[in-house]
Amino acid sequence: MKRTSHLFMLALVLIAPLQKQQVWTANIDQIRRVARMIPGRDPLRINVLKFAESRRAKKFSVKGAPDEPSVQARTVFQVVYADGYVMLDAGMDQQVHNFFGRGVVEPYDLESAKQVEHAVRGARAIIVTHEHGDHVAGVVHTPFANELAPKTILTRDQVQTLLTNPQMPEIKLTPEAAVRYNVVDYEKYLPLGSGIVLIKAPGHTPGSQMIYVVLASGREYLFIGDTAWHMDGVRNIKGKDAPWIQEDENTLVAQLSWLNGLYKTEKNLFIIASHDDEQRMDLVKKGILGNKLE
Ligand SMILES: [Zn+2]
Ligand SMILES: [Zn+2]
């Protein structure tokens, strides 16, 4: 009996540090250092464009929130350098948009969607926060897929999901199509260029990543994709309550806790949730985000 309990204790000692390692965390100082790794001039400004909407009660976006109407903006972001720009997320065509309405017709602005398509085609590089249709379809389910793939960077995890478990049939990648993209794999942080860092953040999806950007002015941004659908999720450390998506909830809470700490202490860092329409309007009004693509 005694021997058994000793073995049990030993097992606990061995297992405990491993489990500790698995809790997601990130270090903003290290991210800032990585943003300086590739020499060059930092980006000058960031634009946002909303091209569609979903109408979802807020209780789905933030656990415990009231059952009141809320708008989920479908957006892309454009990081503008002196000599070109990088797109964060690629938009989606109307067919993929209709999937999200689940039988209900929701607003889709054809003129804005055209501007997204134009911007994606003119970009030097395209990166996506994650492999859901509203973020990635613009480089996968489009007549321009072959043109866009060589300048699109997807992570190994994103490609894996698109090959084997895509959110909808339209964005399924074949192995032949997948090899046309630039596929990267990294452990925690990856410098993309001067002032841009990819931060591995699986949770909302296996291939989710956050994107840190620092402008030449010193202003910082952290694009969190769908880690939270509304910034109240970050402010209150509350996950979603949407039965139609499958997330790694423990990891999500660790990410929301980390973001909450940054939100409280880093006043020059703007944490940006892809679908928070109230935040989008507020930051556009304050001049933190430009309201049109260039
Ligand atoms: Zn998503
Ligand atoms: Zn989304």
Image: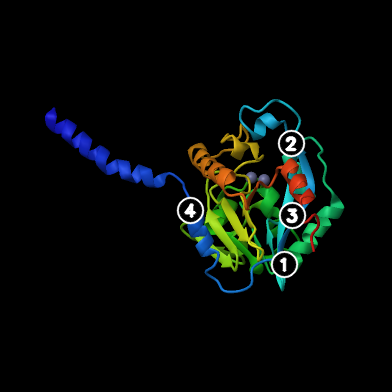
Crowd tier of the residue under label 1, counting other residues whose Cα lies within 10 Å: few below 14, some 14–19, many 20 or above: some
- Relative to the observer, which residue lies in front, 290 or 120? 290
In this view, the residue farthest toward the left is 2
Question: Is residue 288 among what the camera can see?
Answer: yes
Q: Residue 70 sits in which quadrant?
A: top right
Q: Horizontal placement of 146 versus 264: left or right?
A: right
- Label located before the other in sequence (1 or 3): 1
Q: Secondary structure at mark 1?
A: loop
**Hey, what amino acid is under mark 1?**
Ala
Element class at badge 2: loop
Q: Is residue 125 left or right of residue 144?
A: left
**Position of 279 compared to 25: left or right?**
right
Check residue 27 in the rendering and tell me which mark sits there, or answer none: 4
Q: What amino acid is at disc 3?
A: Leu
Q: Tell me whether the residue at label 1 lies in contact with that at label 2, contact meaning CB atoms closer than 8 angstroms.
A: no
| Proximity of marks 4 and 2: CB atoms separated by less than 8 Å | no
In the figure, 169 relative to 114: above or below?
A: above
**Residue at left 58%, top 66%?**
192
Nearer to us: label 1 or label 2: 1
Cα distance between the residues tagged 3 and 4 = 25 Å
Above/below status of 68 relative to 130: above
Of badges 3 and 2, the one in the foreground is 3
Q: Quick check: is the Cβ at mark 3 less than 8 Å away from ligand 2?
A: no
Q: How far apart are labels 4 and 2 at the CA level? A: 39 Å
Q: Is mark 4 within 8 Å of ligand 1?
A: no
Figure quadrant of the N terminus:
top left
C-alpha distance separating marks 1 and 2: 32 Å
Name the kind of residue labelled 2 in the image: Arg
Q: Which residue is mark 1?
A: 123
Report the Cα–Cα distance between label 1 and label 3.
18 Å
